[in-house]
């Protein structure tokens, strides 16, 4: 084991692939993806479910006699969901080591805590649309989790589990993108896949007519420089990974969404150059979590 792995809890042999379930159908693709990833990497799978009993207490607190019965019912339903998910992953690999955890905590609190020592944390997302459709738990975990958080979007196709496309990473020259580049190289290396590094020449803050003020060729040259600087050193660390560099004058979300149609994984930083703290609505990462056609990894600095 390398020295860097010794100092990275997410790479320890004991680090599990953690997947959160909430009882909805949106969790099913995430559980499948997490199980396949854990099986390929010889890692344990931990399926977790947070009951958020504090909210139940707040709702039913005035009915003291009802609270124990309600809490017990939630525990029973949660345990049944976990058991069902654990059974479903046996079809992926009968030898897969599977553990489950039922917690009274809020799902976001539980997953953020588990992310500190997890190899990966995986969540499901429903069909793309308004922010409310994605949910506060997913946004909280992608914004505040540790290590790499993967959102498996239910596209209604097998795209979410494909293994023959490239790993695609969005590069914008920011410190947050450095974590994404490192995670993308590691994923491409593990998967034996090529890596497509994408940088959009137009700054996130430019107006749509910004290209009228700067020649496209100059924008693309600047983008190539940003890309070269951000990739420097990583290709030496991962010499087996084929790197394809792509620059364009377009909206970052448009370019990366298009690439997600052929990618097996899309990797982005937790915040963009514009400082979208907490993945506020309008950030590129948040848009891709909702609309990408493949799983999206939100990488955090370790």
Image: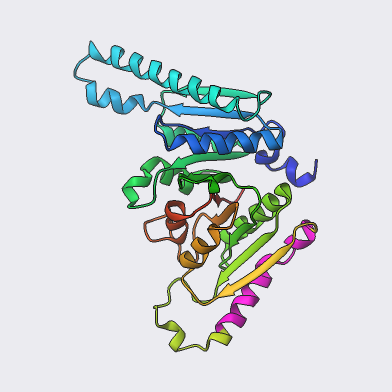
Image quarter (top left, top right, bottom left or bottom right) of the N terminus: top right
Q: Position of residue 126 (x, y in %)?
A: 40, 43
Q: Please state the horizontal and vertical placement of residue 75, each as a whole percent of the image.
A: 39, 17
Residue drawn at the location 72% of the way across and 47% of the way down:
190
Which image quadrant for residue 231?
bottom right
Check the image and report above or below for 215 versus 35: below
Residue 169 falls in which quadrant of the image? bottom right
- Height in image: 102 above or below 192? above
Residue beneath the point at 69% across and 40% down: 11
The part of the chain drawn in magenta is 219-238
In the displayed structure, would residue 14 be above or below residue 185? above
Picture coordinates of residue 100, whole percent (x, y): 54, 23
**Is 15 on the left or on the right of 206, as rendered?**
right
Magenta segment, principal secondary structure? helix
Q: Residue at x 35, y 52 (%)?
A: 129
Q: From the viewer's side, name the closer residue of 245 and 258.
A: 258
| Residue 222 drawn in magenta | yes
Where 30 sits versus 231, above or below?
above
Taking the image as shown, residue 79 lies to the left or right of residue 227, namely: left
Q: Nearer the viewer, residue 172 or 212?
A: 212
- Magenta stretch containing residue 200, yes or no? no
Q: How many marks?
A: 0
């Amino acid at each position: 084991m390398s020295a860097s792995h010794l100092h990275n809890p997410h790479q320890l042999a004991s680090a599990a692939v953690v997947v959160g379930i909430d009882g909805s159908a949106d969790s099913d693709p995430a559980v499948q993806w997490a199980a396949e990833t854990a099986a390929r990497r010889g890692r344990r799978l931990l399926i977790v479910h947070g009951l958020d009993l504090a909210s139940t207490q707040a709702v039913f607190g005035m009915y003291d006699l009802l609270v124990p019965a309600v809490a017990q019912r939630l525990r029973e339903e949660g345990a049944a969901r976990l058991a069902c998910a654990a059974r479903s992953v046996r079809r992926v690999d009968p030898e897969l080591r599977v553990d489950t955890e039922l917690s009274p905590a809020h799902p976001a609190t539980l997953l953020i805590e588990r992310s500190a020592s997890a190899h990966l944390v995986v969540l499901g997302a429903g069909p793309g649309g308004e922010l409310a459709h994605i949910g506060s738990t997913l946004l909280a975990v992608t914004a505040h989790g540790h290590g790499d958080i993967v959102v498996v979007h239910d596209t209604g196709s097998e795209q979410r589990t494909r293994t023959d496309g490239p790993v695609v990473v969005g590069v914008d020259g920011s410190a947050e993108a450095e974590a994404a580049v490192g995670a993308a190289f590691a994923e491409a290396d593990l998967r034996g896949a090529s890596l497509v590094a994408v940088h959009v020449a137009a700054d996130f803050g430019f107006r749509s007519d910004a290209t009228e003020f700067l020649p496209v060729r100059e924008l693309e040259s600047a983008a190539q420089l940003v890309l070269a600087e951000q990739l420097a050193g990583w290709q030496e660390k991962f010499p087996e990974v084929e790197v394809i560099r792509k620059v364009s004058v377009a909206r970052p979300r448009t370019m990366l969404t298009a690439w997600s149609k052929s990618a097996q994984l899309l990797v982005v930083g937790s915040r963009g150059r514009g400082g979208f703290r907490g993945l506020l609505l309008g950030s590129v990462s948040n848009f891709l979590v909702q609309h990408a056609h493949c799983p999206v990894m939100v990488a955090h600095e370790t």
